[in-house]
Image: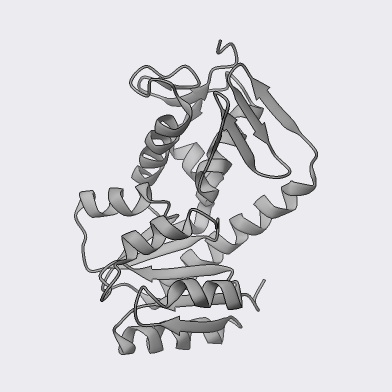
Amino acid sequence: MAGETILVVDDEQEIVQLIQLYLAREGYKVISANNGHDVFGIVREHRPDLIILDILLPGLDGIEVCRQLRKTSNTPILFISCKSEDIDIILGLSMGGDDYMTKPFSPSQLVARVKALLRRNSIREQHQDDPQLVKFPGLEIDLVSHIVRAHGQTISLSAKEFDLLSLMAKTPNRVYKIEHLFELIWSLDSMGDPRTLIVHISNLRKKIELNPAEPRYIITVRGVGYKFNGSAI
């Protein structure tokens, strides 16, 4: 649904104007910032529905901006950067980013990613009306408040991490192929990279498992994908 507010954070004015042009055509309201320090005040004032965030920013880089935002916000974050190495992508997603695009990018592809992220977030928010509490020994997932408690502590998850965990926990012992799980969470038209799923699974394990190297909740099914262990004790 168009009309959502999107915050574009980039110090290259030409990039901001290009993104604004294409998003405005789709009916989105676009606001912008040219440095990381201004982001927090803008987010508090305007409460954007999605943030397009450059990694290489003056003063405070996009990775640190994302890390700080994730302390209080689950707003979808789409990273854009001229850095294309796997380590940069993994780092951005590990800090709570939902998707990643490398410059130069097709404006139409960026619009498609934005639509996919907003659509997924809208579906997630609609599910908040479902009064369910998913519980396993040592793990509790509140599907209404999106609060996750692991081993007695409240855990902060990004929107995508929560979507992954809640989906698998609601269907324990079902084996998901990596490609299928990626499509379910990022949607078919996200045009992203399935490797982002592997990064998010790794992040989840670090947050909810007592020993991420020997997970008891999210289990790897070799040659296939992942499953949530319904008999976890």
At 51% from the left and 50% from the top, the residue drawn is: 186
Screen quadrant of the N terminus: bottom right
Screen quadrant of the C terminus: top right
Colour scheme employed for the rendering of this structure: one colour
Residue 36: x percent and y percent?
Answer: 36, 73
How many numbered discs sit on the rendered protein?
0
Residue 79: x percent and y percent?
Answer: 37, 63
Q: Determine whether 18 is above or below 146 in the image.
A: below
Image-based side of 161 in relation to 57, left or right:
right
Image-based side of 110 in relation to 103, left or right:
right
Residue 192: x percent and y percent?
Answer: 40, 54
At 51% from the left and 81% from the top, the residue drawn is: 23
Q: Which of 5 and 66 lies nearest the eye of the viewer?
A: 66
Q: Which of 225 and 216 lies nearest the eye of the viewer?
A: 216
Q: Quadrant of residue 3?
A: bottom right
Q: Determine whether 41 is above or below 145 in the image.
A: below
Residue 147: x percent and y percent?
Answer: 64, 40
At 37% from the left and 38% from the top, the residue drawn is: 198
At 30% from the left and 69% from the top, the residue drawn is: 60
